[in-house]
């Protein structure tokens, strides 16, 4: 599955079970996985885990990441504060494909209280397999850097 073989993932408590399932799926499909936590269902603060993943994407250590919280909203807000991060909340397959084709998203975000395991796995597969189309979409992404 996909060209990206080394994936960094993280979640809060609300999506811990989803993270564990997605980690197993990634390992089964030949990826290496860096898991920054959370490490259980006890309550934690999602900005801390979102920052751990987004920071390392921003620094170029990983090219693709996956973040999960209850809705996916908080993790999206946090991750998109980091330079160079394009985090896409995808709770469906069309968004997952388009986030790659048009937005060159480098972090997939999902809501563990929103979608089921089978759909989440399929979203991950589509996200990792779908290439960026470049061209006019690259020009638009370059405009992000003009935002003060
Ligand atoms: C945790 O209760 C919840 O607020 C968090 O997982 C996430 O949904 C925030 O956006």
Image (cartoon, rainbow, N blue to C red):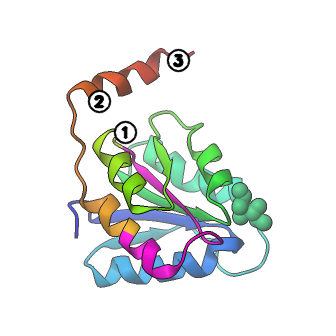
Q: Earlier along the polypeptide chain: callout 1 or callout 3?
A: 1
The residue located at (61%, 50%) in the rendering is 51
Name the residue tied to disc 2.
137
Name the residue tied to disc 3.
147
Instruction: Choose between 50 and 130: the one closer to the eye.
Output: 130
Instruction: Choose between 51 and 97: the one closer to the eye.
Output: 97
Q: Which picture quadrant has residue 11?
A: bottom right
The residue located at (21%, 39%) in the rendering is 133
In the rendered image, residue 40, in percent from the top left (x then y), is placed at 68, 81
Instruction: Work out how far the residue at label 1 is from the one at label 2, CA to CA, in angstroms.
Output: 7 Å
**Which residues are the magenta region?**
105-122
Q: Seen in the image, is 113 located left or right of residue 106? A: right
Q: Earlier along the polypeptide chain: callout 1 or callout 2?
A: 1
For ligand 1, the image quadrant comes to bottom right
Q: Seen in the image, is 63 located left or right of residue 146? A: left
Name the residue tied to disc 1.
103
The residue located at (22%, 49%) in the rendering is 131
Where disc 1 sits, the SS reads loop
């Amino acid at each position: 599955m996909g060209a990206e073989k080394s994936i960094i993932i993280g979640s809060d408590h609300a999506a811990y079970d989803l993270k564990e399932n997605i980690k197993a799926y990634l390992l089964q499909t030949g990826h290496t996985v860096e898991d920054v936590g959370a490490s259980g269902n006890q309550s934690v603060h999602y900005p801390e885990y979102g920052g751990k993943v987004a920071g390392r994407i921003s620094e170029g250590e990983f090219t693709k990441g996956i973040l999960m919280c209850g809705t996916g909203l908080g993790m999206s807000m946090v991750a998109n504060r980091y330079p160079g991060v394009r985090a896409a909340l995808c709770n469906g397959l069309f968004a997952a494909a388009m986030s790659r084709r048009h937005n060159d998203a480098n972090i997939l975000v999902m809501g563990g209280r929103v979608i089921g395991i089978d759909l989440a796995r399929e979203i991950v597969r589509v996200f990792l397999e779908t290439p960026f189309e470049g061209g006019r979409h690259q020009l638009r992404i370059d405009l992000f850097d003009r935002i003060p």
